[in-house]
């Protein structure tokens, strides 16, 4: 039988209650949170899609491994298992644990970049951009043009524009580019994958110019699944073989294990360069910890060692990507404007098209996110004018799916909530800011409906 119903490839052994509230209660709660969903207590949220980072559920094997955690300061068994698991997939010579992805970024850019340098990426994630800029270097996004149009479909919308990379190298010179990065999948561009062919071409350009290529590998397993599904010649390969092939095209990576590491905390930095690894480990000791734990507990290293392998399991990836796509397809079929095609870890709704009567200056993304909460207790995040102010090119609302946390009936409920909001969209009002911090204002802003 070829079943159409998506079933979770796990059964539930431990449950965490979630709390139903009434609309009247949510109105009071939202007012108390100054219409900023970051300021809501998580207990007052029914379905929390704020982020897929560190919010996943661990498996029985991960919990069992946690009990094996060796908390020795130096040379722990847990580090050996962690390193073996990372090297099995990523293949790089040096594996440096960090407390999360941005710590790996800070160390990598801290030792490789200086003022006047330029770092190309398909799209820098916000912490990646901030860590590049903190060294005085310039972060340049070189996404293919298709990646910038929400409604336009393309199988590998996360690809880098290879001609633009060549042109950049010709313009600024190889000496000013300490490394090139490829983010798989491209989070800021809608969770869209990068093809093997594109990675091969980018790697070819880098090797020709003698520039190291690094992967921002947070969602490497989801990227491998998209390649298996969409790229010719990969249908018969396993996600692990695909990931291994991709990492062979590079010289190292940064990783947040809070995504496809299936862990609640952790990350790492890899490189094949002995000298660089030495400098990185010296900096690690200064700010994160000894190189065999890097700011993590031995038990965290164990959870990541197991989680990385589980993230590559085909039945898991099939369910994961199908479940995200199911949500996207169901709401798009009813007319809800979303970034197409659905990404790996999230669905992004286009709030400007959803609420055309609300100008960007009145934060349509925030208005939509607030309404989803009022309607059904769903927490999402605005990625638009509140987050980026004048630099916002779009007003999106991201529904990020935690890994292995919600079931198909939760997704059906989400569809119901979103379609109810869609039906009543003309009654939604814009918002105005009543307080903003000088930096990263979206985390702490206060707003009020107009
Ligand atoms: C593509 C990408 N890079 C880097 C990071 C940073 O990782 P962390 O939050 O673990 O510091 C994230 C986190 O969301 C991400 O999505």
Image: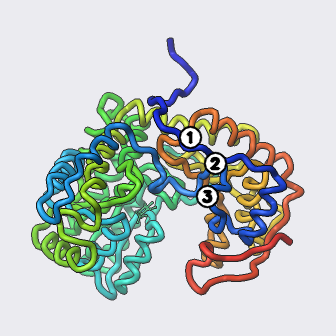
Nearer-N-terminus badge (3/1): 3
51 horizontally vs 315: left or right = right
Residue 61: x and y in percent read: 32, 38
Residue 183: x and y in percent read: 39, 59
49 horizontally vs 81: left or right = right
Residue displayed at 60% across by 73% down = 443
Q: Which residue is mark 2?
A: 47
* Structural crowding at the residue carrying mark 1, measured as other residues with C-alpha within 10 Å and reported as few (<14), some (14–19) or many (≥20): some
395 horizontally vs 275: left or right = right
Relative height, residue 191 to residue 205 (above, below): above
Q: Which residue is mark 3?
A: 42
What colour scheme governs how the chains and residues are painted in the rendered image of this protein? rainbow
User: Ligand 1 falls in which quarter?
Assistant: bottom left
Where on the picture, by quarter, is residue 289?
bottom left
Label of residue 406 in the image: 1
Query: Residue 224 versus residue 169: which sits nearer the camera?
Result: 224
| Residue at the extreme right of the image, as rendered | 427
Nearer-N-terminus badge (2/3): 3
Between tags 3 and 1, which lies in front?
Answer: 3
Query: Residue 272 versus residue 367: which sits nearer the camera?
Result: 367
Residue 406: x and y in percent read: 56, 40
Between tags 2 and 3, which lies in front?
Answer: 3
Nearer-N-terminus badge (1/2): 2
Q: Marks 3 and 1, Cα distance to the nearest angstrom?
A: 16 Å
Query: Residue 391 versus residue 103: which sits nearer the camera?
Result: 103
Residue displayed at 80% across by 50% down = 22
* Structural crowding at the residue carrying mark 3, measured as other residues with C-alpha within 10 Å and reported as few (<14), some (14–19) or many (≥20): some
Residue 190: x and y in percent read: 54, 55
Q: Label 3, secondary structure: give it.
A: helix
């Amino acid at each position: 039988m070829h079943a159409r119903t998506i079933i979770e490839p796990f059964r539930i052994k431990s449950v965490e209650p979630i709390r139903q509230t009434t609309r009247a209660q949510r109105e009071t709660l939202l007012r108390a949170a100054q219409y900023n969903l970051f300021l809501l207590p998580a207990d007052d949220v029914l379905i929390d899609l704020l982020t897929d980072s560190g919010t996943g559920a661990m498996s029985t094997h991960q919990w069992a491994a946690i009990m094996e955690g060796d908390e020795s300061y130096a040379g722990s068994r847990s580090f050996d298992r962690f390193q073996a698991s990372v090297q099995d997939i990523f293949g790089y010579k040096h594996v440096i644990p960090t407390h999360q992805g941005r710590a790996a970024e800070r160390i990598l850019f801290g030792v490789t970049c200086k003022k006047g340098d330029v770092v190309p990426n398909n799209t820098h994630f916000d912490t990646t951009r901030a860590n590049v800029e903190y060294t005085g270097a310039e972060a340049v996004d070189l996404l293919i043009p298709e990646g910038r149009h929400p409604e336009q479909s393309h199988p590998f919308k996360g690809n880098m524009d290879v001609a633009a990379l060549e042109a950049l190298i010709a313009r600024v010179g190889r000496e000013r580019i300490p490394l090139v990065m490829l983010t798989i999948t491209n989070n800021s561009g809608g969770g869209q994958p990068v093809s093997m062919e594109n990675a091969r071409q980018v790697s070819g350009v880098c090797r020709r110019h003698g520039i190291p290529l690094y992967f921002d590998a947070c969602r490497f397993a989801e990227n491998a699944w998209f390649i298996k599904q969409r790229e010719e010649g990969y249908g018969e390969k396993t996600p692990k073989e695909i990931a291994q092939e991709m990492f062979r095209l590079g010289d190292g990576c940064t990783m947040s294990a809070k995504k496809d590491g299936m862990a609640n905390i952790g990350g790492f930095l890899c490189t094949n360069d002995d000298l660089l690894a030495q400098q990185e480990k010296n900096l690690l000791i200064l700010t994160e910890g000894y190189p065999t734990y890097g700011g993590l507990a031995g038990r965290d290293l164990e959870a990541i060692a197991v989680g990385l392998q589980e993230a590559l399991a085909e039945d898991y990836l099939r369910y994961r990507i199908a479940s995200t796509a199911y949500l996207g397809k169901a709401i798009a079929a009813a007319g809800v404007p979303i970034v197409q095609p659905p990404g790996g870890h999230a669905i992004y709704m286009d709030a400007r098209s959803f609420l055309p009567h609300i100008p960007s200056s009145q934060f349509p993304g925030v208005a939509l996110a607030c309404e989803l909460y009022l309607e059904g207790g769903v927490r999402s995040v605005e990625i638009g004018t509140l987050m980026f102010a004048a630099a916002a090119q779009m007003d999106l609302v991201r529904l990020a799916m935690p890994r292995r946390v919600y079931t198909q009936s939760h997704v059906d409920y989400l569809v119901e909530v979103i379609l109810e909001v869609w039906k009543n969209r003309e009654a939604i009002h814009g918002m105005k800011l009543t307080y903003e911090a000088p930096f990263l204002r979206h985390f702490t802003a206060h707003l009020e409906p107009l």
